[in-house]
Amino acid sequence: MSERRAPRPSTTPASRRDLRRAAPGTRLLLLGVDVVLVLVFAAVGNRTHQSGLAVLDVLTTASPFLLALLVVSAALWPLARPSRLWPDGLLVLVVTVAGGMALRVLLGLGGAPTSFVVVTSVVLAVLLLGRRLLSGLLRPATRG
């Protein structure tokens, strides 16, 4: 008579599990979610400041931040850890905000007053780091 064994819980430490690489399809999906979150940030900002909610208005507002997000995501692509808060998520946040602000000024899309930098940093931190926290929690644990 054979006895059924329950699956063993993962003995891989959480820090080593975080180093596993995400599949390319997963990375693309999560990058798509980040893009949508930046677009939501721009749309809410436009609505708050009555700047227009037409697609072109939102894309114009979001474009510097989207470009910065895509650049940092491309740089991190080989690491393939789109759900990590540290250091990947923080790096994505910092480059998206700083690069977006610099591009906004360079492209003549507006200035970067301190209040805008603070609000942008807080909102994008909640959105981009929150997404990483949620996707990290929802990621199925695999045996290592």
Image (tube, rainbow, N blue to C red):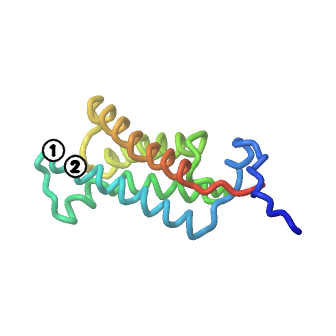
Q: Residue furthest front?
A: 1
Left or right position of 11 against 140 = right
Q: From the top left corner, tell me how far across and down residue 72 is, in percent.
A: 53, 52
Q: From the top left corner, tell me how far across and down residue 80 is, in percent.
A: 64, 58
Can you identify the residue that label 1 sits on? 48
Amino acid type indicated by mark 1: Thr
Q: Residue at x 27, y 35 (%)?
A: 116
Can you identify the residue that label 2 sits on? 44
Do the numbered discs 2 and 1 sit on residues whose CB atoms are within 8 Å?
Answer: yes
Amino acid type indicated by mark 2: Val
Left or right position of 37 against 29 = left
Q: Residues within 10 Å of mark 2 (few under 14, many from 20)?
A: some
| Quarter of image, res 5 | bottom right
Q: Residue at x 22, y 46 (%)?
A: 45
Disc number placed over residue 68 in the picture, else none: none
Q: Residue furthest right?
A: 1
Q: Residue at x 16, y 59 (%)?
A: 53
Q: Residue at x 43, y 56 (%)?
A: 34
Q: From the top left corner, tell me how far across and down residue 83 is, in percent.
A: 56, 51
Q: Quadrant of the N terminus?
A: bottom right
Q: From the top left corner, tell me how far across and down residue 18 is, in percent.
A: 67, 48
Distance, label 2 to label 1, CA atoms, is 6 Å
Instruction: Tell me the element at label 2.
Output: helix
| Quarter of image, res 35 | bottom left
Left or right position of 79 against 133 = right
Instruction: Tell me the element at label 1.
Output: helix
**Number of numbered tags placed on the structure image:** 2
Q: Residue furthest top?
A: 114
Q: Quadrant of the C terminus?
A: bottom right
74 in relation to 130, above or below: below
